[in-house]
Image (spheres, grey):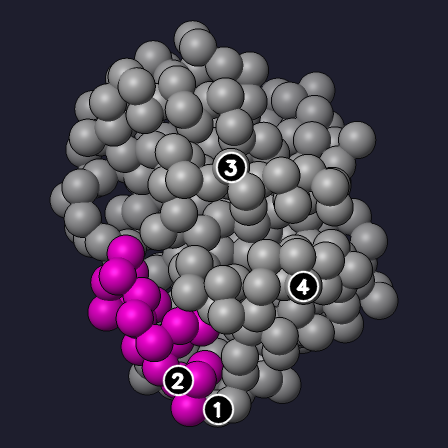
Amino acid sequence: MSRLATRFNQLQSQQRKALVSYVMAGDPHPEVTVPLLHRMVEAGVDVIELGLPFSDPMADGPVIALAAERALAGGTNTLDALAMVKTFRQKDQETPVVLMGYLNPAEVIGYEKFIAQAAESGVDGILLVDLPPEEAGEFNQVLKRHGLDQIFLLAPTSTDERIQHVIQQASGFIYYVSLKGVTGAATLDTAEAAARIAKIKTQTSIPVGAGFGISDAQSAKAMGAVADAVIVGSALVKPFSTLPPEQAADQTVNKIKELRAALDE
């Protein structure tokens, strides 16, 4: 059984919801990331979503786009991010790690090499934002050969046909984009998102996580009432845009503790 399946089964048996927390690999420099990942887990994170820095992050708002710029300026690339996962695994063999990025770097490296190295590093799943399920067959086959999960996005605008495509191919969990817009947007309608997630959950047993627009205890608790996981990104990355890395990490960890407490109430 995969780490993701194991973790979601554990949480379900405890009647708890997963906290999935995003961090940009190498932001603001490579030495920050691995210690931060360990602190995030200690603070209550169940699944790590590790961003792969990319120069054209079309689905990301300014907070994460600037984090990618900082990481690239600091010298971090996709293979460096995989090396960070491998280092993280020296102390943590249990916490699932999902890569979130874009198709171009995977194509440049080559699907087989990229996925084989990801698996060898200890990655559990991959979400490529701009790889639609209708075109993901080849990538999915390579993932399956290496035992990795493919995470797909669904959105408020997803058609019934798209939902079925995702349900048929996805594993690990399904990432529901809970608003129309980019990461970090502040127009979350929790009632509408909850209704759509509930509909998806009637069609599949794969866990459904909600992300985009979740930034505080209130929104996390509201989405956690219906979703299997709450995914938080921009609110955790934002401190690194204005504070020294040590202070930013402290703020990120405190935010995680706040979100964890809200989900466990």
Q: For mark 1, does the 10 Å Cα neighbourhood hold few (<14), some (14 to 19), or many (20 or more) residues?
A: some
Identify the amino acid type marked 2: Arg
In this view of the protein, can residue 172 be seen by the observer?
yes
Do the residues under discs 3 and 4 have CB atoms within 8 angstroms? no
Mark 1 and mark 2 residues within 8 Å of each other at the beta carbon: yes
Separation of residues labelled 2 and 3 (CA atoms): 33 Å
Rendering coords of residue 237 (x, y %): 40, 68
* Numbered tag placed on residue 113 in the rendering: 4
Q: Residue at x 58, y 31 (%)?
A: 171
What whole-number distance in Å separates the C-alpha atoms at marks 2 and 4? Answer: 26 Å
- The residue at the point 78 percent across, 48 percent down is 94
Identify which amino acid the numbered label 4 is placed on: Lys
Q: Residue at x 17, y 41 (%)?
A: 180
Q: Within 10 Å of the Cα at label 2, are there few (<14), some (14-19), or many (20+) other Cα atoms? A: many
131 or 16: which is nearer to us? 131
Q: Residue at (44%, 84%) from the top-left corner? A: 72
Tell me the residue that label 2 is attached to: 70
Q: Nearer the viewer, residue 156 or 56?
A: 56
Q: Amino acid at mark 3?
A: Gly
Q: Is residue 56 magenta?
A: yes
**Element on which disc 2 rests:** helix
**Residue 128 horizontal/vertical position (percent):** 45, 52
Q: Earlier in the sequence, mark 2 or mark 3?
A: 2
**Residue 5 appears left or right of 66:** right
The x and y percentages for residue 196 are: 28, 20
Front residue of 185/136: it is: 136
Q: Which residue is mark 1?
A: 74
The residues colored magenta run: 51-73
Numbered circle sitting on residue 137: 3
